[in-house]
Amino acid sequence: ATAHAATPKKPQVLNVAHRGASAYAPEHTMASYELGDKMKGDYIEIDLQMTKDGHLIALHDETLDRTTNGTGQVKDHTLAEIKQLDAGSWFNEQYPAYAKAEYKGLKVPTLDEVLKRFGKNKKYYIETKAPDIYPGMEEKLLCTLKKYGLTSKKSLRNGHVLVQSFSQESLLKMNRLNPDIPLVQLLWYDISGHISDEELNEVKQYAVGVGPNFDKIDRSYVQKVREHGLEIHPYTVNEKADMRKLIDWGVTGMFTNHPDRLREVLKEK
Ligand code: G3P
Ligand code: CA
């Protein structure tokens, strides 16, 4: 015991910059990630898709239509084709209050470029999206992480990488390929969220935590997950009142498009 033992240590709540600081800059562009970093998000969240020629890129949708001026499936386009696209102008049109001239013409980044830009001192929360249509995605992810020194014991111990997926199959594969990478099982509820002891015991076999949508869970859900010794990182929490409520319930992190707001809330206590 130390002389300061009477002061309880504040539990750490991870601030995950969802698609970067995506309320303020076009999601999954270098500008969005840079802003997430500047706003002191602990993690940059990256959704992965794979090009026709096998490159991992940072993009949320399986199609190019919503967040670029291209159309069609990512898997039907080469990286060279995708690099021609403008991944920023849509944001200026949709969110004029946050529009910036410099967002026009931003490129879709590869995972490789993001890891090169931020290096191994940053933390990455990476999602394997649609792994069923991208065979080999998990191997490529591991290979890219390794290239940037992010699979070393030290990096993993310090929490530099978390891999998340809605696909249990993808997480089990990651676990087989490298059992040292911490994994988070994403969950989605359309009605009141409930998780059984059996489900939690199963998740515990391969993951360190769960990531449910925040709007269908309650205090008892959070407590149950924590009692099983698992982390809980709900998504995507953008209002301060919701952030405060979830912190009070005992979540251990959350995804937000507003890492600046979460930082302010975390400073309140
Ligand atoms: O990864 C957490 C959250 O981002 C899951 O939903 O659709 O935004 O990737 P989505
Ligand atoms: Ca995601």
Image (cartoon, rainbow, N blue to C red):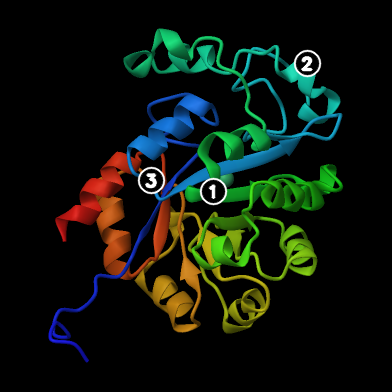
At x 86% / y 29%, what residue is drawn? 53
Most foreground residue, 10 or 122:
122
Q: Which residue is mark 2?
A: 81
Looking at the image, is 251 positioned above or below residue 220? above
Name the secondary structure under disc 3. loop
Q: Residue at x 40, y 59 (%)?
A: 253
Total labels drawn: 3
Q: Is mark 3 within 8 Å of ligand 1?
A: no
Residue 72 seen by the camera: no
Rate crowding at label 2 as few (under 14), some (14 to 19) or many (20 or more) other CA atoms within 10 Å.
Answer: few
User: Label 1: which residue?
Assistant: 120
- Structural distance between the alpha carbons of marks 3 and 2: 31 Å
Q: Is residue 96 above or below residue 45?
A: above
Q: Quadrant of the C terminus?
A: bottom left
Amino acid bearing label 1: Lys
Task: Pick the quarter of the image with the N terminus.
Answer: bottom left
Instruction: Estimate how packed mark 1 is, as few (under 14), some (14 to 19) or many (20 or more) residues with alpha carbons within 10 Å.
Output: some
Q: Residues within 10 Å of mark 3 (few under 14, many from 20)?
A: many
Q: Residue at x 48, y 70 (%)?
A: 231
Amino acid residing under circle 2: Glu
Residue 155's x, y, as percent?
56, 60
User: Which label belongs to residue 41?
Assistant: 3
